[in-house]
Image: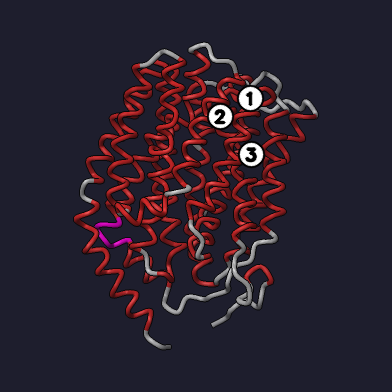
Amino acid sequence: MWRPGPNPLDSPAVRTSPSVLRLYYFLSFAALGAYVPFFPPWLEARGIHGLAMSSITALLPFVGLASPVAFGVASDALGLRGSLLCVASFGALAPFVLLAVASAAHVPLGYGAIFAAVALFALFRTPVVMLADVMTLESGSSYGATRLFGSLGFLLTAAFGGRWLGGTRLAPLPVAVAIGLALAFAVSTMLRAPRAHATEPVLDGAGQLFRSGAFRLFLGVTLLWGMSHAAYDLCFSLDLRDLGAKPSVIGAYWAVGVVAEIALMSVSSRLVTKFGSARLIVFGLAVVGLRWALVASVSSLTVLLWLQPLHALTFGLVWVAALGYTKEHAPAHVLATAQSLFSIATGIGAGVGMLTWGALYAAGKGPVVFTVAAAVAGAGGVLSLFLAPARATTSAVVASDETATAQPS
């Protein structure tokens, strides 16, 4: 069977550097810290509202569904972690370079051009996160202690970027995102990962995992969580603006949430060890439902600011616990593929949410959006109650697969 030749980005002689991974997370999520809070107002400044805005913002989760499995299977089968991360990083960068150049040159950009650029960005952005997470999980470093640098990059951009990115000028936002992605691509060329081919058929292992009822239930829970949390990504900045917050202040609200997320991620490995990933998912989704119910009923900017530390639980805790659950239940030789299935589930949820929340916001503003989002989170929380009892079944499936994998070739 054909195998590709040695690649310096995937050398077996070196391990993934934790410091380079931290820098990569920092720069990659710094770009996202410009995109997530300030992109919806940027679209509105270009006259794109309601369902049209939702159709563009939904591209990141929806179009991202087309690529994670392809990247994940290739990564597991060929052992090309670093090489594929470079490809994905460049693919995410290219469309924002075009948007930045066009905006700086005052070239009119209509709905179609922006839609196409964001679609290309979305095609590669999801594999970027998935591959970086897999490399971190395999590096032997604490995932939370490494991933928190991504949250720190997001925090700094969101907190201090509002003055330049949240106004009516059209060039600063795509330029800032392009710079962050360009630096992340440069760092991706320095990442090294051990080159290890799968010793068992990757597709067979992935099929066995997907046939597990417990893992399918887990994917359903994360789909509902992704849908619910998309309300925050799309509508929270708009809600704050409608309540009278200035762009620079909006960035500070996002920053408070991310500071809490960073603090939690610094101790997340101990939480997963002590309580178990399934229990943390249940708890996190309960807090998600409570948070959105409170956001829906509160009109005070001060109270909303005090609610922001809950972001540590509604995003940071659920994300880390979900990655822990994936690693616990996936055979080692299909970890990237399993991670891609998790990415697809959250992407479907976020995409459905983006399409839903934009239209709901146009009709009823923040209270309607976050009330429905709370109900969606509640449904996910009810399903998550069945994760822990089902875990023994899935563990048995995985254990048998790992036993077969461990046999000498």
Q: Is residue 204 above or below residue 292?
A: below
Amino acid type assigned to the residue bearing label 1 in the image: Gly
- Residue 211 lies in the magenta stretch: yes
* Residue at left offset 41%, top offset 54%: 269
Q: Where does label 2 land, which residue?
A: 37
Residue 153 screen position, x and y as percent: 61, 41
Label 1 sits on residue = 162
* Residue 317 rendering spot, x and y as whole percentages: 39, 44
The amino acid sitting under disc 3 is: Ala
Q: Which residues are magenta?
A: 210-215
Closer to the chain start, of discs 3 and 1, is: 3
Number of numbered discs: 3
Tell whether 334 sits left or right of 63. Answer: left
Q: CA distance from mark 3 to mark 1?
A: 23 Å
Q: Which mark is residue 117?
A: 3
Residue nearest the observer in this picture, 266 or 5: 266
Q: Is residue 131 above or below residue 177?
A: below
* Circle 1 crowding by C-alpha within 10 Å: few under 14, some 14–19, many from 20: many
Amino acid type shown at disc 2 = Pro
Relative placement, left or right, of 361 versus 174 is left
Query: Residue visible at 66% across and 77% down?
Result: 6
